[in-house]
Image (tube, rainbow, N blue to C red):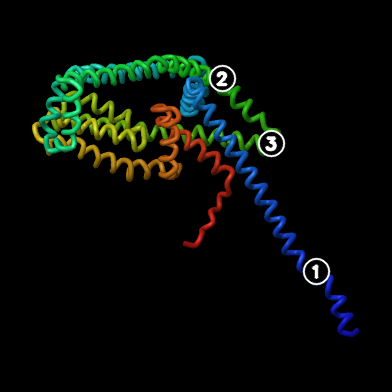
Amino acid sequence: MNDAQVETSGAPTRSRRAGVPERASLLAGHALWIGAARAATIGIFLLLLTGALDLARSLFLPLVSALVFAFVLAPLQAAAERRRVPAGLFALGCVAALVALINLLIILTAAPLIEWFGRGPDIVASLGDKLRILAAPFAAVRDLERALSGDAAKVGMNIEVTSFVQPTLAFLSPALGELVVFLAALFFFLVGRKHLRRHVVLFFATQEARLRALRILNDIEDSLTRYIATAGAINLGVGLIVGCASFLIGLPNAPMWGVLAFAFNFLPYVGPLIITIALFMAGLVVFPTLGHALVAPGFFVGLATLEGHFITPNIVGRRLALSPILVFVALVFWTWLWGPMGALLSTPLVIAGTVVVNDFLPKNEIELPE
């Protein structure tokens, strides 16, 4: 075979070899566009879902809250059913206990808060005397008040009361209706728990999918119950410590501070910040010096740091590890979407989502090089 024949016979081979990268590039580009289309579809769905959750807040918020509480109470209900307690009686008892708890919290905090708000003028005057070290940044604000009205203190007080009363009424009016829907939904969720579980499991066609759905439901119930029980016990201890410390430091209404610390500590990041600011403001009013006023908030910051970074992670983290970034992002999102109740539901929703994701992802983690 001469050189011309060799070159002629090798041309198709080189052509086929040259076409392989081109075909691979086309397939890669096609796969990229398919992935982008799927991502866009998921993004559009999430945007529409967020809009629906926002527009139908008064409907979805009490229903989701009731569903979360039903998951938390599910192990207790299962234990009650083993002792032949009717589901209706258990549900009625849970609703009654929840209403009694809400009334107890209102009784313990309403009277002291009304007393503090009734001392509004004295509190404003006391804060002005204590914060003279920070008088320079507020000088322009005081000058503006004097320019707008001859009686600056009166105007400032009117603005404060109006700005407090109107948002409170605007919040309480729909909140009462949502509370009624929440209690009714919780009752019916608990009564029909078995039927709901059966419908969710039988929705899937294959036996493997049904077993996975049942396992996910059980894991969500177990994880939420353990988290709420553990967090409740820890927060109860925090509330008792804060109440005793407030009494020893000299703050009035020590039981109120303990109840507030217990309730607000369920809100990650935001709750301890609110309590710290409230303790600092109360210290400024009650104590004569700025250093004395910093004792209570400083003690609470140390206690919250110990609880949030060492106690709770070591106890809860053994059962379910949560990413701090994920918890913070969920807190911001649900607070923006549903307000204070969204902040309260953010961590349970993260726990439920983590359980679902962990069930679908492979259990063997791959260690990546640093």
- Residue with the mark numbered 1: 15
Could you tell me the amino acid type at mark 1? Ser
The answer to whether residue 93 is seen in the rendering is no
Q: CA distance from mark 1 to mark 3?
A: 51 Å
Number of residues whose C-alpha sits closer than 10 Å to that of mark 2, classed few (under 14), some (14–19) or many (20 or more):
some
Earlier-in-chain disc, 3 versus 2 = 2
Residue at x 19%, y 28% (from the top left corner): 144
Could you tell me the amino acid type at mark 3? Gln
In the foreground, 75 or 362: 362
Number of residues whose C-alpha sits closer than 10 Å to that of mark 1, classed few (under 14), some (14–19) or many (20 or more):
few
The answer to whether residue 250 is seen in the rendering is yes
Total count of labels: 3
In front: label 1 or label 3: 1
- Residue with the mark numbered 2: 192
Q: Which mark is residue 207?
A: 3
Q: CA distance from mark 3 to mark 2?
A: 23 Å
Could you tell me the amino acid type at mark 2? Gly
Earlier-in-chain disc, 2 versus 1 = 1
In front: label 2 or label 1: 1
- Residue 274, quarter of picture: top left
Secondary structure of the residue carrying numbered label 2: loop
